Image: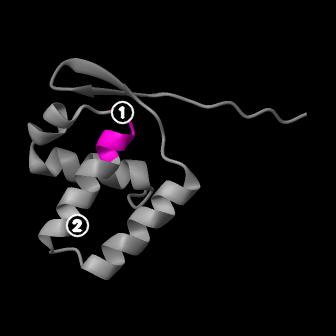
Amino acid sequence: MLELKRTELGVTLYGERHVMRPPTVDEVETLQVKLKKLGSDSVESFGLMKSFVSDLGLPKDVVGKMESGHFTTLVEYLSGTKKN
């Protein structure tokens, strides 16, 4: 029997551990559709990605203090756009 349970994602940022949840299929799809419509260089797309990460459990003040490259890496990891 297959049993699937909700999981948590531990993220350590600058020595501080945070617990997030992985996004749902619908959340990833919604993000990708909206980003495609907005274009990757728009200011709105960056705000959309910040909200995406915050909605998954990373506090907004922590998101705002991240280095931009680290933020991009986290978004790619969460959305499945970066292949491991």
Work out whether 53 lies above or below 19.
Answer: below
Residue that appears at 11% across and 50% down: 68
Main SS of the magenta part reads helix
Q: Residue at x 73, y 34 (%)?
A: 4
Q: Position of residue 46 (x, y in %)?
A: 18, 61
Say what amino acid the circle numbered 2 marks.
Ser
As drawn, the label of residue 45 is 2
The way the protein has been coloured in the rendering is: one colour
**As rendered, which of 30 and 71 lies closer to the eye?**
30
Q: Mark on residue 57?
A: 1
Query: Vertical placement of 39 versus 54: above or below?
Result: below
- Observer-nearest of 83 and 22: 22
Q: Quadrant of residue 47?
A: bottom left
Q: Residue furthest top?
A: 16
Q: Is residue 36 magenta?
A: no
Quadrant of the rendered image containing residue 49 = bottom left
What amino acid type should be assigned to the residue bearing mark 1?
A: Gly
Q: Which residues are magenta?
A: 53-57
Viewed as shown, does residue 63 lie left or right of 35? left
Q: Is residue 71 visible?
A: yes
Quadrant (top left, top right, bottom left, bottom right) of the N terminus: top right
* Helix, strand or loop at mark 1: loop
